[in-house]
Every structure is written in structure tokens, then in C-alpha cells.
Image (tube, grey):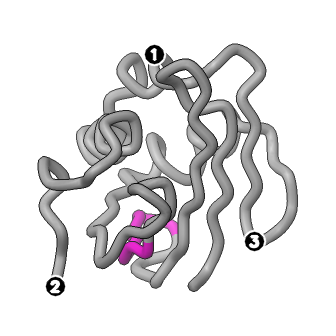
Amino acid sequence: MTIPVSQLSNPVVRAFVAALNANDEAAMADLLTPGATMSDDGSDRELRQWLDREVFASRGHMDVQSEADEGLALVADYRNDTWGSMRTKWVFTVDGGKISRFETGQA
């Protein structure tokens, strides 16, 4: 069962998912610390390039299925125009109300 974005327990992660699903680049940028990092399937990627390719240019969308670790870990059905739909995991590091790192990959 999908968890509505408005019911995700961590407010920063909730805002991240909302920005991603709305394809809102400005809102996403506001949620990230300067120098924020990320990895995809265990390999570090350049964050802005990854977001442009995997989210914004390909209309990424997350349907969250479960959350753990006080809302900092999600399992979601993620889809975009490039790869279709897949089950993914997301783990966030939040510092000072912003995301300093996230790790994603197939779940």
C-alpha cells in the first residue's frame, strides 16, 4: 500500500519526495546542502547531473511503500520515462534541516 506523501514522517524527506514528484527543481535545490552527495546502486554519482537525468528530464516519480529509521529510509516504487518502474530503496542523511546525502538503488 502506498503511503501518501503528506503522511511521511520526516519533514525533510517528505519535502524531497514532494519536490521530486512535482518535478520542482527549485524546491529540490532548496532541500540540499551545499556539496550534497549521493550514490546509485552503490556508486557515487554527481548529484546535479543524476537529478537532471534520472528525475527532471525523465519525469521521475516515487510511490513510497514503506519507511523506517524515523522516516530517513524508504522503499518506493520509482518510475521515470527512461527506465520504467522499479522497486527502490532510499536512505537520507539530514543535517540542519537539509539533505547532505542520499543513497538509492534497487530494493
Q: Amino acid at mark 2?
A: Met
- Residue 1, numbered label: 2
In the rendered image, the residue lying farthest to the right is: 43
Image spot of residue 32 (x, y percent): 57, 24
Magenta stretch in the rendered image: 75-82
Residue, disc 3:
41
User: Which quadrant of the view contains residue 42?
Assistant: bottom right
Identify which residue, 10 or 56, lies in the foreground.
10
Q: Is residue 20 above or below residue 95?
A: below
Image spot of residue 74 (x, y percent): 44, 67
Mark 1 and mark 3 in contact? Answer it, CB < 8 Å: no
| Label 2 to label 3: alpha-carbon separation | 24 Å
Residue, disc 1:
30
Determine crowd level at label 1: few under 14, some 14-19, many 20+ residues with C-alpha closer than 10 A: some
* Quarter in which the N terminus is drawn: bottom left
Q: Residue at x 18, y 76 (%)?
A: 2
Q: Residue at x 71, y 37 (%)?
A: 47
Q: Residue at x 45, y 16 (%)?
A: 30
* Quarter in which the C terminus is drawn: bottom right
In the rendered image, the residue lying farthest to the front is: 70
Identify which residue, 102 or 80, lies in the foreground.
102
Q: Is residue 75 above or below residue 72?
A: below
Front position among marks 2 and 3: 2
Q: Amino acid at mark 3?
A: Asp
| Label 2 to label 1: alpha-carbon separation | 29 Å
User: Which quadrant of the view contains residue 36?
Assistant: top right
